[in-house]
Amino acid sequence: MVEDKLLIWKLRRGSRDALCRIYEKYRDDLLRIAAGLLNETNAAEDIVHDVFVAFVRSAGQFQLTGSLRGYLTTCVANKARNLNRTKSIQRTVNLDEIEPMASNLKRPEQWIINNEEFGQLNSAMAKLAYEQKEAVILRIQGRMKFREIARMQETSVKTALSRYRYGLNKLRSIMNSEVTK
């Protein structure tokens, strides 16, 4: 948090290095969150870039009251939610559209198993209600507290916790039923 405040201070004074550091520090996590919420890699990249552009434009007036990571995560989640609303019908991704996942595993059979499991999880996530999916992704990928998720979803902490719990339970159910087939 101290590093983030220093980086924001430097950014206000025109430091490109500060912007690069902030971008490198949070880009991958934000991309995972956006991709999980949208099921589209290209749209996720667009949203993350839009969030950083807006952040840079508002850097002069920006006041960090919490964590920068939490602020950027909230911005990405809000943009993803808005994009999903404009689509009106949530589109699921076919397994053929999923880009191959890079792996550092040594044996090909392990890579194939992990790639298949990733596809199953992605397919299962697409079956969740959006609010549940958002709560699960923000909690696990975004490492947000339920209080933050509740504030962002404009609901109570108990509702955010319930959405997370129901989402996980449904994921378990979907994944277990696929294993038994």
Image (cartoon, grey):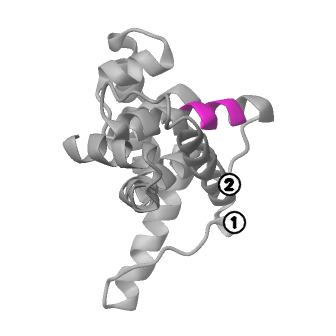
27 above or below 174?
A: below
State which region is magenta. Answer: 78-83
The residue under label 1 is: 97
Which element type, helix, strand or loop, lies under badge 2? loop
Please report the residue visible at 50 percent of the width from the left and 34 percent of the height from the top: 60
Depth check: give the residue in front, 171 or 139: 139
How many neighbours does mark 2 have within 10 angstroms: few (below 14), some (14-19), or many (20 or more)?
some
Residue 144 place in picture, x, y as percent: 32, 33
User: Which amino acid is tagged 2?
Assistant: Val
Would residue 149 be seen by someone viewing this image from the given angle?
Answer: yes
Residue 77 place in picture, x, y as percent: 53, 35
- Magenta span has 81? yes
User: Of all residues shown, which one is farthest toward the left?
Assistant: 2
Please report the residue visible at 52 percent of the width from the left and 34 percent of the height from the top: 75
- How many angstroms separate mark 1 from mark 2 (CA)? 6 Å
User: Which amino acid is tagged 1?
Assistant: Glu
Residue 50 place in picture, x, y as percent: 64, 46
Pointers 1 and 2 in contact (C-beta within 8 Å): yes
The residue under label 2 is: 93
Please report the residue visible at 43 percent of the width from the left and 47 percent of the height from the top: 13
How many neighbours does mark 1 have within 10 angstroms: few (below 14), some (14-19), or many (20 or more)?
few
